[in-house]
Amino acid sequence: MAFVAPKETYSGKVFEVAIGTGKTVAFGGENVLPFSAFEGNVPNRPVVAYEIQDIPPDDWPETVRKVYEGVSGDPVTWAKHCQDRLGAKAVALRLLGTHPDRNNRSPEEAAKIVKDVLAAINIPLIVLGSNNVDKDSLVLVAVSGAAQGRNCIIGKAQEANYKTIAAAAMANNHKLIAMSELDINLSKQLNILITQMGFDKEKLITDPMCSALGYGMEYTYSVMERIRLAALTQNDTTMQPPMLGDVGMYVWKVKETQALEADLPKWGSLEERGIAWETATAGGLLIAGAELLIMRHPAAVKAVEKFIDELM
Amino acid sequence: MLVIGEKLSIIAKRVREAMMKKDMGPIQEIATNQWKQGAGMIDANIGPAEDGGEELMQWMVTTIQEVVPLPLCLDTTNAKAIEAGLKVHNNEWGRPLINSTSNDPERFPILELAAKYDSQVIGLTVGKGGLPADAEERAAIAAEIMARAMEYGVPLEDLYLDPLVLQVATSQDHAVKVIKTIRMFQELNDPPMKTVVGLSNISNGCPKLLRPILNKYYLALLIYEGLTAAIADAHEVVETAKTIDVIMGNTLYAHSYLEM
């Protein structure tokens, strides 16, 4: 008798989210575990967005800083470079310069930067704050208005600031990232609180908080896996938004992406090591269920796209 | 766990009057409330309905399903009324459930109806000779009903075994026997047999203030033993059902779980 692979069927389905207005892109929509199209329907491939900043990436390690030399001094040039030269499907603009400890840029300045970037590109834009909960609630409100009509993703809304950010995203018809700190129950709770404000659950993206390989990635992996299982096996609609892996910013600050070959010759080429670290972290989180990744190094993005090609 | 909303019973004065006057308002209001509170099925109890039962059951089925997208539990001893109800039941919202057959030969025609109309059916584990003494006797009667169901062409997965909950105020020893029975019923087949109880029977005859307390704690114990469904007031038991679902790991916990 021929072997018949056992198949699981699930009662739930991940919401499909489409972003952008020119060249749009969609992710999510599957009713099976990651890359298990043989059991059901996987309408979209995961999306990788290139991370850029409103200020030069002075604190990025040399390996990833040098690939953006000449373009990273200005967010508009940088965004266009990602779109035109690197073939980015989406760009994630992190407004790090708004942080009170950095340039303390005003919400109005941030809004203008977002407008300028949007005017220069045709691909979808993800706009991220500086992860200062007070400042983000001002900046992201201004930015939401500036990006009105462009169907962006705004983030990140957290327990301490979700009300103003969600209201602004709702008023300007954007998608919203809801981030909690590596706790599946708090992640569910935040999604509930945001939807109780009237925000459409099908416009949410869950960020259970990322972490790099070797630095707690197994926690992110496990929370993502459990979120996806709750969505599919328990048909828990609060856990059915697609998930984000904000990979680049976590990977490019760990020792393995920075330690010099001269100091640690056994670890091999620093450049290859960094790219491999970002690739491996991203690949792991895709297997756990992430549908949207934010990454930095073009070589790592290329490797992850190939990985997706082979698994789809 | 499936809650079969129980508030539409001829025993309740408001419902009885609405049934007599064919006043759709109160029936639809109660059914809608049960649905909104989490009922997955609505019990339509028209009593023995010896006169005009067929017409009354059809009126109940269409009246309820006009506003609530759920299947119904057709609750009467009148087989003709059941058949009339099955004919108009909208299976788009799920398959109906007949309440009930038993091990009394007079109730076997109900199994015929279940097979003919592809309906699910409750098997009340009583026979001709009065109430079962304990869990073992209930299980023995259940086995006979199961054999009868197969004979009539009713698949065992469409049969819900009802151990018959008795009043704690008068038959206290049966309360724990019924809990034990829920476990035993499941062991009668693989996959396990489905089970159902008429929950509020436990507190029948008790002071009004005590009734919800008895109902809710009893339900928690029954769910723990694997109860599939309860005919109960959804409004009263929704908190219990959701909380037990969290404790048993069927729902992912969040601080707002009761609001979901």
Image: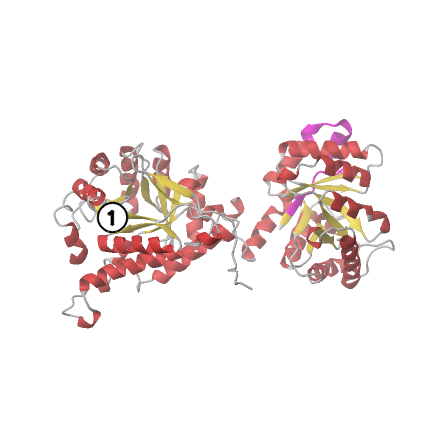
- Quick one: SS at disc 1? strand
Image side of residue A214 versus residue A264, left or right? right
Q: Chain of mark 1?
A: A
Quarter where residue B248 is shown: bottom right
Q: Please state the horizontal and vertical placement of residue B165, each as a whole percent of the image.
A: 75, 53
Name the residue rendered at 76%, 56% in the picture: B146
Q: Horizontally, is B116 left or right of A75 in the view?
A: right
Please name the residue shown 64% across and 45% down the image.
B236
Marks counted in the figure total 1
Q: Is residue A11 left or right of residue B236?
A: left
Q: Which residue is mark 1?
A: A51
Residue B20 lies in the magenta-colored region: yes
Residue B163 versus residue A121: which sits nearer the camera?
A121
Q: Which residues are magenta?
A: B3-27
Residue B224, compared with residue B116, is above or below; it is below
Q: Seen from this angle, which residue lies furthest bottom?
A: A266
Tell me residue A50's x, y (percent): 25, 48
Q: Amino acid at mark 1?
A: Glu
**Residue at the front extreme of this rendering:** A1
Say if residue B97 shows up in the picture: yes
Q: Position of residue A202 (x, y in %)?
A: 43, 41
Front residue (pair B131, B221): B131
Which quadrant of the figure has residue A270? bottom left
